[in-house]
Amino acid sequence: MTEGSILTDDFLRELINVGEVDILIGVPTYNHAGTVGQVVQAIRTGLLKYFPRQRSVIINADGGSKDATQELVRAASISDLQHGPSLHALRTLHSISTQYPGGPANGAALHTVLAAAELLRATTCVVISPDSTNIEPEWLESLLRPVSRDGIDLVLPLYRRNKFDGLLVRNLVYPMTRALYCKRVREPYPAEFAFSGRLGGYFLGQEIWSQEVARAGAEIYMTISAIAGNFRLAQSFLGTKTRVDHVPADLVPAMRQTVGVLFWSLEQNFSIWSAHPDSQPIPTIGAEHEVSLDPIRVNRKRLHQMFVHGVAELEPVLESILSAPTLAELQSAASVAEEDFRYSNELWVRTVYEFAASHHKSVISRDHIVQALVPLYRGKTHTFLLENQDASADEVESNVEALCLAFERLKPYLLEKWDGRK
Amino acid sequence: MALPQDLLWYKDAVIYQVHVRAFCDSNGDGIGDFRGLAQKLDYLQDLGITALWMMPFFPSPLRDDGYDIADYRSVHPNYGTLEDFKLFLEAAHQRGIRVIIEMVLNHTSDQHLWFQESRSSPANPRRDWYVWSETDTRYRGARIIFVDTELSNWAWDPVSKAYYWHRFFSHQPDLNYDNPAVREEMWNVMKFWLDMGVDAFRLDAVPYLVEREGTNCENLPETHAIMKDFRARLEQQFPGRMILAEANQWPADLRQYFGDGDEFHMAFHFPLMPRMFMGLKLEDRKPITEILQQTPTIPESCQWCLFLRNHDELTLEMVTDMERDYMYDEYARDKSMRLNLGIRRRLAPLLDNDRRRVELMNGMLMSLPGTPIIYYGDEIGMGDNVNLGDRNGVRTPMQWSGGWNGGFSSADPESLYSPLMLNPVYGYQSVNVQSQKRFEHSLLSWMKHLIEARKSTPLFGRGSIEFLYPANHRVLAYVRQLGKDTVLVVNNLSSSAQAVELDLRPYKGNILIEMFGRNIFPRIGDLPYLLTMGPYQFYWFRLRRI
């Protein structure tokens, strides 16, 4: 690989063979042999069905898989070397794979995809998660059409989710992004999303790619950049999103990739989020949201214990992050029995905003600040699960909306803390 | 001049298709004729073509441009006399140009004496020369070909009070090939022209000769048996003469028309042509390589006929619905350009008058396996007139000069059989033989060079082909080989410059000699052979081990 380039010579040679394209599909992977074959086949079907005339390419940016991931992606190619039953494809479809250096990282994968998109002058791009085994060919149309037909720059997904799935997004990422950046983006940290070549080029040109924040949470930063850069956003309903079971150990990296980047972005975009008024909806294609109510077994008691222990063990850290009244309220909440414990929206929003302000001021290591939020988030999750235990879909949505409004209402509180005034 | 005695002459031929009516008018009546055509044989010889295929010139009411024949043994008075034809034939042979004439076996005009007699009475001896029925419900499996004009393959004859069978226009009743007398008479018609010295027949609409209930009435074994009988007679009585099948069919169905080398010598490769246009527009070789992969091997003595455009619409029968929609959208967005299941346009307008694309398509035509056919006027980039009805827009007068009537005729312009092209882009003042002869880099001059290169080796007509499948799908590359003679052809189907790496290791040690400029390219080694190509550029390289 040429020094300073993220593209290997072999990959570049493959891109030369692909040439200019209309549609580029990026699939970031790392040891996804169990699922990626199914995903790329669905992508191929979607392209043949909905975009048969467009010049398309599937680009697999792999983090160093040791399994058959790359071979499975390459097998989705359609070329004149293949014999047997005709696929009724007008065109050649290249499905190529490359490994980027430095080990698996979504940001590095996205960086590779963006670089390929710019070189191939792709006008419409989409990123698909390699473990979305329930992907339907229609997802391609739902994501790509708003870009190619309507001139949208970033199309974010809407899923049918279980009411207890995507809790970090529901309780923090969505409401806070909405309150601060004033766009009602339900999935600011998307697993699947489409974007215009224009936005891709803009994002590729950002000076973030050497920073940890891009390596860990490029997707949410792309959403924020698109909002900050006044690009046109829309969201498109895709259908059911397979529930990914999170083990507790996953929460810290997830928090870094989302909340950490969101906090960091506030630094970059102060003039934007501090000036914006109330949130506005963005164009939505298909259903606005759907919630399924299938019962899911969650250990609430364990969440409560982790909250209580966290508040106790992290007291010195929390003292440096939170205001005294907020910490006192938290400690008070942690002292009550589990069945009586509630983490109110008001307290949660103040907690989060004080964390954001402390992150800005770097009162301690920023990474420690983000990590310290994890046990508190577990407490909020406990309350969300309890309050929505028997809730209908509308009631769940109503509760999420109430939290969002709390984040919006208390935005001046963040500004106050941000400036350092108490 | 005696023609070479090579029995396989058609494999090396470069055929030029022409309407007598459209080429040159010698007597000032506004219609081209055989004397005019004979006057232009020097032009054709200079162009380098080796065979001339003429559309029907027989007496006819001309309701289907002569494919509705009213007398098989004569010449339409518009075009001259039988004597004029003989003189033309002799003149062509003197220049080494063979003559292929049209023979419409399947049907006649309803004005033909045979049909007049047949319809006159059920008792007439020629009643069974055509296919009559009391009902219009027989042979329902047969599709309607001219879907824009015909509702049924049966037509009611008020004279005969019965229905007659017609696969094309209703004024073209099908002959009844189950009748031995018809078969015998049609052979006698062919023999009439063969005795005169005609070199070959292009046999029109051959899949439809015989009808059988419960079938689609196409490609039936009985039809093949008839053709094999004609071929056997031809071999026996006129060795070295050739028959060419017009059968717009899929390759697998077309294959049957070659038999075991005992049916047709040649057949048009209909499915390839639209895919060449498709590949060019998609900038992707896939449609071309795929159809050639599906093309079956044919007997050694047989040959495919390749063409880009002809007197008919650019037929889209042999493509999928998705491909047809694509072709319409890309090449005939204006619906007036569409006819039946095809596009009624000439080569240059189809390619937006882009010289590079015209050259590339002609380059592929001349280098893919088969015998190429050039449609008259395409060698100078003539345009079309979609405002003329049916397929007449691609049958306008040949444009010889910028003078009176484009040099085609001395008649008053109003009396020409068809209006001349007059627009500033394709009109005869802009596009004509005389002006293009003056410039070395004109399309006409370039076509001469191309034909010359094609004829410099028998490899293109007789050699094998091996596709190279470089990873760059915009590049179509193949190796043609005959004995020790090897030519590498590389075509860039893209509108942009391309880099391509070719795996030429089997030819390691050879140097490449570009066939048009005769420049030497680097020797082939172990590494992939890297070529960079401009938009729509193509190379023909002769491989030499020196």
Image (spheres, coloured by chain):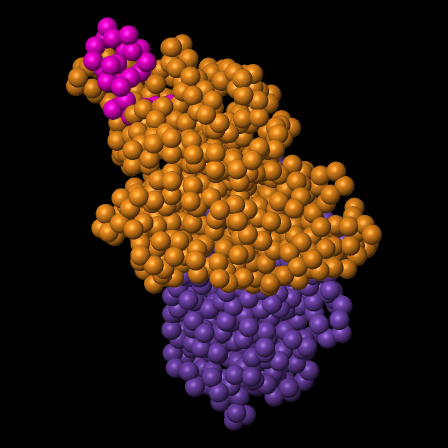
Q: Quadrant of the N terminus of chain A?
A: bottom right
| Residue drawn 52% across the image and 68% down it | A197
Q: Colour of chain A?
A: purple
| Quarter location, residue A381 | bottom right
| Residue drawn 25% across the image and 24% down it | B111
Residue A159 lies left or right of residue B3; in this view the side is: left
Q: Position of residue B217 (x, y in %)?
A: 40, 20
The chain whose colour is orange is B
Task: Using the image, determine if residue B454 lies above or below residue B160.
Answer: below
| Residue drawn 66% across the image and 71% down it | A215
Q: Is residue A3 visible?
A: yes
Task: Using the image, determine if residue A93 lies above or below residue B50.
Answer: below
B297, A229: nearer the viewer: B297
Task: Using the image, determine if residue B29 lies above or below residue B430.
Answer: above
Q: Position of residue A48 (x, y in %)?
A: 50, 47
Task: Using the image, determine if residue B196 lies above or below residue A13.
Answer: above
Report the residue that reaches farthest toward the left. B158
User: Where does the magenta region start and end?
Assistant: B106-130
Report the residue that reaches farthest toward the top. B123
Q: Is residue B468 visible?
A: no
B38, B464: nearer the viewer: B38
Residue A42 lies left or right of residue A65; in this view the side is: left
Q: Is residue A159 magenta?
A: no
Q: Is residue B119 magenta?
A: yes
| Residue drawn 48% across the image and 48% down it | B43
| Quarter location, residue B266 | top right
Q: Position of residue A358 (x, y in %)?
A: 60, 85
Residue A102 lies left or right of residue B394; in this view the side is: right
